[in-house]
Image (cartoon, helix red, strand yellow):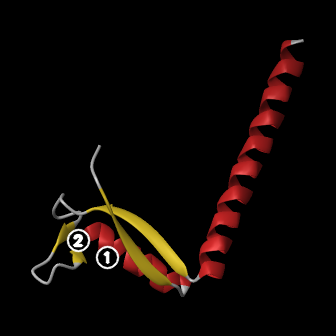
Amino acid sequence: MKLVRKISLVVASIAALGAISSASADKLDDVIKRGTLNCGVVLDFPPMGYTDKDNKAAGFDVDYCNDLAKVLGVKSNVIKCNQM
């Protein structure tokens, strides 16, 4: 009986991982179809995110968003978020 329970747990885990993978792929497809990658960035936490002298978003998180959008072939949209 313990063996059946272990096998059932393994099968359920594999099924759950498969569902997560397909959900992520769907979201990525949505981003590519939309043509814009929206990235929420906290802009009062340098060097991760801040506003530069020209009042534009800058920092590691902004650079990451821009680089990822470039690889996907879409535009990036940085959305200012507040820390919790």
Tell me the quarter of the image containing the N terminus: top right
Q: Is residue 1 left or right of residue 40?
A: right
- Residue 39 to residue 54: above or below: above
Q: How many marks?
A: 2
Counting other residues with Cα less than 10 Å from the Cα at mark 2, is it few (<14), some (14-19), or many (20 or more)?
some
Find disc 1 in the rendering and name its residue.
63
Nearer to us in this view, 73 or 41: 41
Name the kind of residue labelled 1 in the image: Asp
CB atoms of marks 1 and 2 within 8 Å: yes
Q: Residue at x 62, y 70 (%)?
A: 28
- Residue 23 to residue 1: above or below: below
Find disc 2 in the rendering and name its residue.
59
Residue 52: x percent and y percent?
Answer: 14, 77
Q: Secondary structure at mark 1?
A: helix
Tell me the quarter of the image containing the C terminus: top left
Counting other residues with Cα less than 10 Å from the Cα at mark 1, is it few (<14), some (14-19), or many (20 or more)?
some
Quarter holding residue 55: bottom left
Q: Residue at x 23, y 71 (%)?
A: 59
Name the kind of residue labelled 2 in the image: Gly
